[in-house]
Amino acid sequence: MFGRTLPNILAIIFLSGLFIEFAPIEQMTNFLGGGLLSDTLVGAGIGSVSTGNPLISYVLGGELLDQGMSLLAVTALLVSWVTVGSIQLPAEMHSFGLRFALVRNAISFLFALIIAFLSLITLQTLGVAL
């Protein structure tokens, strides 16, 4: 089983390295500095127009937080990155219909914002230092 998953794990590590190389995190943190709501919307927007593997999101999220991005922006980016599918939207519309694809993506975007705020509220309630 490990032998079958090792190529995927290595590919994920290499892809996350390429992402960090071609999308410098310092530029992303400079771009996201407006405020809670605007950072969350921009993070969710960036995640919506890209797509990613949930395994890469752990590495990427840690790097983004280490570089100073807000928890709201990182959470919104990663949740929308995994759930909103702008890149695969044409295939989804073809398979499931226009209305279903658009409604699913809109709901996923909305829930990415809600989950980001709920994550922050939960951590603040628990007293976790951010």
Image (spheres, helix red, strand yellow):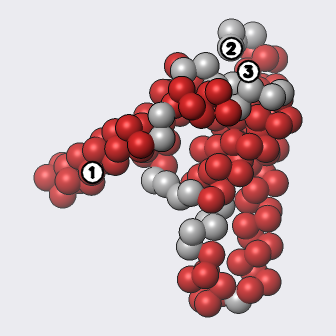
Tag 2: amino acid: Leu
- On the image, the x and y values in percent for residue 54 come to 48, 49
Amino acid under disc 3: Leu
Distance of mark 1 from mark 2, alpha carbons? 31 Å
Q: Is residue 12 left or right of residue 130?
A: left
Say which of 57 and 2 sits in front: 57
Q: In this view, does 74 lie above or below 42?
A: above
Determine whether 66 is above or below 5 in the image: above
SS at circle 1: helix
Closer mark to the observer between disc 2 and disc 3: 2
Which residue sits at x=61%, y=66%? 85
- Residue 24, horizontal then vertical, whole percent: 48, 34
Answer with mark 3 or mark 1, whichever residue precedes in sequence: 1
Q: How many marks?
A: 3
Q: Label 2: how many residues lie within 10 Å, few (<14), some (14-19) or many (20+)?
A: few
Q: Mark 2 points at which residue?
A: 130
Any mark on residue 123, and which?
Answer: 3
Could you tell me which secondary element the residue under label 3 belongs to? helix
Q: Residue at x 78, y 52 (%)?
A: 111
- Neighbourhood count class around disc 1 (C-alpha, 10 Å): few under 14, some 14–19, many 20 upward: few
User: Could you say which disc has been placed on residue 11 in the image?
Assistant: 1
Regarding residue 119, the answer to whether it shows in the image is no
In the rendered view of the protein, which quadrant contains the N terminus?
A: bottom left
Q: Residue at x 27, y 51 (%)?
A: 11
57 relative to 8 in the view: left or right: right
Few, some or many residues within 10 Å of mark 3 (<14, 14–19, 20+)? few
Which of pointers 3 and 1 indicates the residue nearer the eye? Answer: 1
